[in-house]
Amino acid sequence: MPRFLSSRPDSRLIPLPWETPLAEWPTEHLVALPRGISRHVVRFIKVGNSVYAAKEVIEDLAIHEYRMLTDLHRTDTPAVEPLAVVTGRVDIDGEPLDPVLITRHLEFSLPYRSLFAQGVRPDTVGRLLDAMVVLLARLHLVGFLWGDVSLSNILFRRDAGEFAAYLVDAETAEMHEALTDGQREHDLTIATTNLYGEFSDLEAGQMLDASLDPQKLVESILTRYRELWAELTGVEEFSDQEVFRIENRVRRLNALGFDVAELSIETSPAPDGSHIRIQPKVVDAGHHTRRLLRLTGLDVEEHQARRLLNDLDTFRARTNQGHVDEAVVAHQWLTECFQPVVTAIPPELRGKREGAQIYHEVLDYRWYASQRANREVPLVEATWGYIQDVLRALPDEAMTDTRAIGDERQLANPYDPSQGFVDDDGPMPEDPWEAAADGVEVAPSGFLDIEALRTARKRG
Ligand SMILES: Nc1ncnc2c1ncn2[C@@H]1O[C@H](COP(=O)(O)OP(=O)(O)O)[C@@H](O)[C@H]1O
Ligand SMILES: [Mg+2]
């Protein structure tokens, strides 16, 4: 009998064919959604209206990853949500099968290869790297050492004009009280090695814009990360004539999407007046997300929240309600602006974009339409125009069946992109980033030795 380790069990999982190796599951339980190439057998499974990702993996790793993802969930760090580990599986001959880790499928998420296959503008690559760097800094802030930073272990979601990055693979991770500089550098080294491999591979497949150079791209990760980290955690010193710099620092952090929960301020006497030394001690991501949630109950990504809050401010000014309580205006905005746009989307087009993203795109659309028409185009009119001109033509992002992707080539197995295309003659595609990860020297941490586990498993 399989055992379910779970804090929020879904009883619909119990009758699934756990006695069958995941790779052989009948397709009635599976959905073919885009995903990255993986080392393990990974399938998307469907129970009722829910879609879960299932990964078949040795027991220690399954449980370790489940715990790591649970920790991330608790600290509100963007990662896939763990649901259960199914252990104690045996096949019909009584032979043991590896456990399965189950996570909730992250809706509207895009593996980077799907993004690049659609064609990516050079500045978009910069946005993806920014999203990745924010994710890495957020992980490091909570003491999470990833160990396997790579684009294939990240899922991207559209976030207004930017992207939000989520961690998907926590197999090699470790949670600490706080990370040392050396540990953070270790993750950065792995990130640069893996991303260099991934970008070179995209370049070889002619999916990387010719103006971009893999080496320069990975170097920019280091600069971006170090700048962000310095802003989030760095010490600033100034004279007591410049107290405004405290406020400035908080504003800069807010602009980056962070709230300062704890700021240490020390003053020390100096010959020319006293000196002030400030350092953020606790910063929480999601500054705009939290504010929008408080005002409207909408839970959206950070840049989407910023865009929606701006629109709310505009609405307030336009309706002359500067003196009215913000929460009251927010409710009006929700029912008069936001909801009409989202409910106008025909049900069959809802899988293309998430509500907040649609609203953001409609605002953009309205701006261009107003410029063109030389008049203020009303929101309802813009929504209809957007549905006809933009939304209908977009590929589905919620539930894209990999078989239906604009790609002419047919996958050998629509449930497993790792197996390549039917017209591939040569060997199976190698996973250059996983291979690069294998090559990286992982300093023994005395905590979890993945290689030793794998070797023991191979021998066993
Ligand atoms: N919860 C999830 N939501 C969406 N996609 C997922 C989820 N879990 C896994 N995937 C997809 O499956 C791929 C492989 O998963 P991963 O955990 O990285 O496996 P491996 O350990 O074999 O590398 C990921 O790149 C991602 O595209
Ligand atoms: Mg992976």
Image: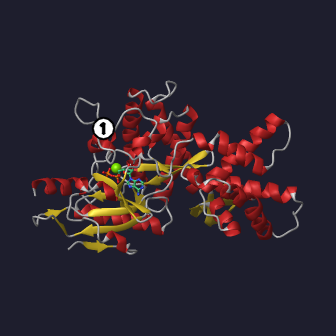
Q: What colour scheme was applied to this rendering of the protein?
A: secondary structure
Q: Hey, what amino acid is under mark 1?
A: Gly
Q: Looking at the rendering, in which quadrant would you find the N terminus? A: bottom left
Dot 1 corresponds to which residue?
420
Q: Residue at x 77, y 47 (%)?
A: 381
Figure quadrant of residue 302 = bottom right
Estimate the x, y position of residue 48 in percent, counting from the top left.
41, 66
> Eyeballing the image, is 321 above or below 123?
below
Q: Looking at the rendering, in which quadrant would you find the C terminus? A: bottom left
Q: Residue at x 65, y 68 (%)?
A: 297
Estimate the x, y position of residue 43 in percent, counting from the top left.
32, 54
Secondary-structure class at tag 1: loop
- Image mark count: 1
Frontmost residue, 420 versus 7: 420
Q: Residue at x 71, y 68 (%)?
A: 295
Figure quadrant of residue 199 = top left
Estimate the x, y position of residue 342 in percent, counting from the top left.
66, 56
Number of residues whose C-alpha sits closer than 10 Å to that of mark 1, classed few (under 14), some (14–19) or many (20 or more): many
Q: Residue at x 45, y 42 (%)?
A: 112
Residue 414 as seen in the image, left or right of residue 223: left
